[in-house]
Amino acid sequence: MAIMATRTKLTSLLSSLVNNKSNKILISAKSGTRSSGFALHSSSAAAADPDVVGARGVGLQIMGVKDYEDYRRSLYGEITHKALLVDAVGTLVVPSQPMAQIYRKIGEKYGVEYSEDEILYRYRRAYEQPWGRSRLRYVNDGRPFWQFIVSSSTGCSDSQYFEELYNYYTTEKAWHLCDPDAEKVFKAIRKAGVKLAVVSNFDTRLRPLLQALNCDHWFDAVAVSAEVAAEKPNPTIFLKACEILGVKPEDAVHVGDDRRNDIWGARDAGCDAWLWGSDVHSFKEVAQMIGVKV
């Protein structure tokens, strides 16, 4: 109840800040088209359409980082980071090759004729459409959703083509770590007593993927949207990660590359949050910000 009251207080304050500035302020934040399993991230293509942000997002922009930190201190006292939550796609790992290139390359033997540019365009258009079969995109292994995405992107509904693509994105060939120093840094962070978790919008292939990349043992917990039945920016997935780790949300910081899903979602849960590629650019920098020497 106390946490909910705190969030309500924060939202009320931010809304009042917005109203004092303008009743019609809107801020657009570019958010890359994110697909966990057949993925394309904004780093490997042009930026996707901007998301229109409501009063809470505007308030955070008006407050600025220092004001936000000061407000957190007024709520929780001195800021502590007993746990580090890390986004998967775009923060921990990235596709080794552009999605459209892989769709095209594998699809040639199945009759796919679309160019990479056309595949990318159709992929984005399909991914942005409401997914009517469930309130979640990634349910269990995510196959129904990804079958829709693949056929919409390429015009090919061949089941063998889909399975080859689907399985490819579960292997270490498809992905690589964003930060080559990640293992060294995470070991130092855990040694300092800070707990680690992956928090990701992904289907059930995430765990075998982390195993394939030999990084699953770096983390104390993995919160996958397909398993907890909540997708970022829903604060439930962050709260679940904190519950598994045994820490209060206000004692955790989340790092991710999507402003809407990672930053605003984590802050709605009561966590601190830093934007990968803006607030922080490496896990060594993350470690320094939480007071861990690497």
Image (cartoon, helix red, strand yellow):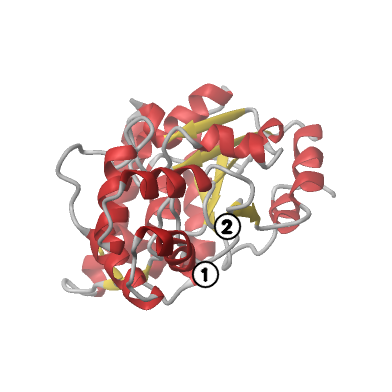
Say which of 148 and 267 sits in front: 148
Specify the amino acid type for callout 2.
Val
Tell me where residue 81 appears, x and y as whole percent: 64, 40
- x 55%, y 32%: residue: 207
In the visual, does 203 lie left or right of 212?
left
Which circle's residue, 2 or 1, is located before the other in the chain? 1
SS for callout 1: helix
- x 71%, y 57%: residue: 179
Q: Which mark is residue 43?
A: 1
Quadrant in which residue 132 is drawn: top left
In the visual, does 50 lie left or right of 246?
left
In the visual, does 44 lie left or right of 177?
left
Can residue 83 be seen from the camera position used here? Answer: no
Tell me where residue 257 appears, x and y as whole percent: 50, 59
Say which of 235 and 207 sits in front: 207
Q: Is residue 41 above or below residue 222?
A: below
Which quarter of the image is occupied by the N terminus? top left
Q: Is residue 3 above or below residue 33?
A: above
Circle 2 residue: 94
Tell me where residue 116 appears, x and y as whole percent: 40, 74
- x 72%, y 58%: residue: 285
Can residue 14 be seen from the camera position used here? Answer: yes
- Label 1 environment density (alpha carbons within 10 Å; few <14, some 14–19, many ≥20): few
Q: Number of callouts in the render?
A: 2
Tell me where residue 94 appears, x and y as whole percent: 57, 57
SS for callout 2: strand
Quadrant in which residue 140 is drawn: top left
Specify the amino acid type for callout 1.
Ser
Q: Is residue 270 above or below residue 56?
A: above
